[in-house]
């Protein structure tokens, strides 16, 4: 299987030097080959380890009430009762 690393890099907006393309192509091909060798899972995936099956806990709604002042006590910076965070969009 041939993998077009240049195309993948373009889609991922990565810059890869031409001298490293062959190495990345070889690495990607070996990863795909390894994944193709993995066995298929049928049915319930919790049977992967019969001695320790995965069980989800019940979703329980919390009933205790916590004061707003107590919740915001560890906030690094507050203004008008709200947590101040750094600007992420310009």
Image: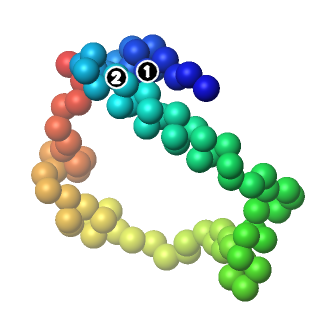
Percent x, y of residue 5: 43, 21
Q: Is residue 32 above or below residue 70?
A: above
Circle 2 SS class: helix
Give the SS element for disc 1: helix
Residue 26, given in percent of the width and then of the height, sits at 44, 32
Asked which colour scheme the image uses, the reply is rainbow
Look at the image and tell me whether residue 82 can be seen. Answer: yes
Circle 1 residue: 5
| Crowdedness near tag 2: few (<14), some (14–19) or many (≥20) residues, C-alpha within 10 Å | some
Q: CA distance from mark 2 to mark 1?
A: 7 Å
Q: Residue furthest bottom?
A: 51
Q: State the residue in front, 77 or 37.
A: 37
| Residue ID for mark 2 | 21
Task: Point out residue 80 in the picture as x, y percentages from the top left corner.
Answer: 18, 45
Q: Marks 1 and 2: in contact by CB < 8 Å?
A: yes
Q: Is residue 78 above or below residue 25?
A: below
Q: Quadrant of residue 51?
A: bottom right
């Amino acid at each position: 299987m041939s993998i077009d690393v240049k195309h993948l890099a373009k889609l991922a907006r990565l810059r890869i030097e031409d001298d490293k393309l062959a190495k990345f192509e070889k690495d990607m091909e070996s990863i795909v080959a390894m994944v193709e060798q993995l066995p298929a899972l049928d049915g319930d995936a919790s049977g992967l380890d019969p001695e320790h099956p995965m069980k989800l806990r019940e979703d329980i709604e919390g009933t205790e009430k916590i004061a707003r002042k107590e919740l915001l006590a560890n906030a690094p910076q507050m203004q008008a009762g709200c947590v101040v965070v750094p600007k992420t969009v310009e």
